[in-house]
Image (spheres, rainbow, N blue to C red):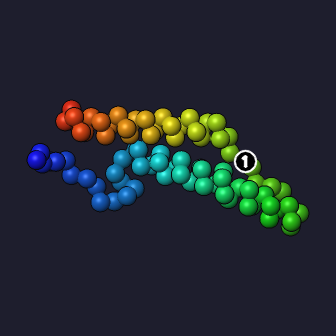
Amino acid sequence: MEEDTQQESKNLWASGWRPFFGWVGGVGFLYTLLLQPLLSWYARIRGWPEPPPVDTGTLTVAITAIITIAGFRTYEKQKGVAS
């Protein structure tokens, strides 16, 4: 069995740019699919202005790109060509 010599960061936020975009995308989808509709409903009841929606097209494209890049990185690591 081949030993992995690369050390991974134990800090969730410091392990690179991909986790950052994953967290941003996850929060974006959470807001779009759950929080914004609930906040809009509550705002209508109270007579407040509704919170703005997020452009889901842009959000989906960005997250798909990040997932694709992460998949390529995983493939490179499995084949032993990752630096």
**Residue extending furthest bottom?**
46
Q: How many labels does the image show?
A: 1
Residue, disc 1? 53
Q: In this view, does 50 lie to the left or right of 47?
A: left
> What residue is at 29 percent from the left and 60 percent from the top?
10
Task: Note whether 61 is above or below 6 in the view shown.
Answer: above
Looking at the rendered structure, the kind of residue marked 1 is: Pro
Left or right: 83, with 17 as reference point: left
Residue at the image position 71 percent from the left and 55 percent from the top = 36
Residue at 74%, 56% (x, y): give it.
37
Task: Determine the residue located farthest toward the right in the rendered image.
Answer: 47
Q: Residue 34 at what x, y percent from top left?
A: 66, 57
Residue 40's place in the image compared with 69, above or below, is below
Residue 11 position within the rendered picture, expressed as x and y whole percent measured from the top left: 34, 59
Image quarter for residue 13?
Answer: bottom left
State the image coordinates of residue 41 (x, y, percent, origin top left).
80, 61
Compare residues 24 and 71 and report the one nearer the observer.
71
Q: Quadrant of the C terminus?
A: top left
Q: How crowded is mark 1: few (under 14 residues within 10 Å), some or many (20 or more)?
A: few
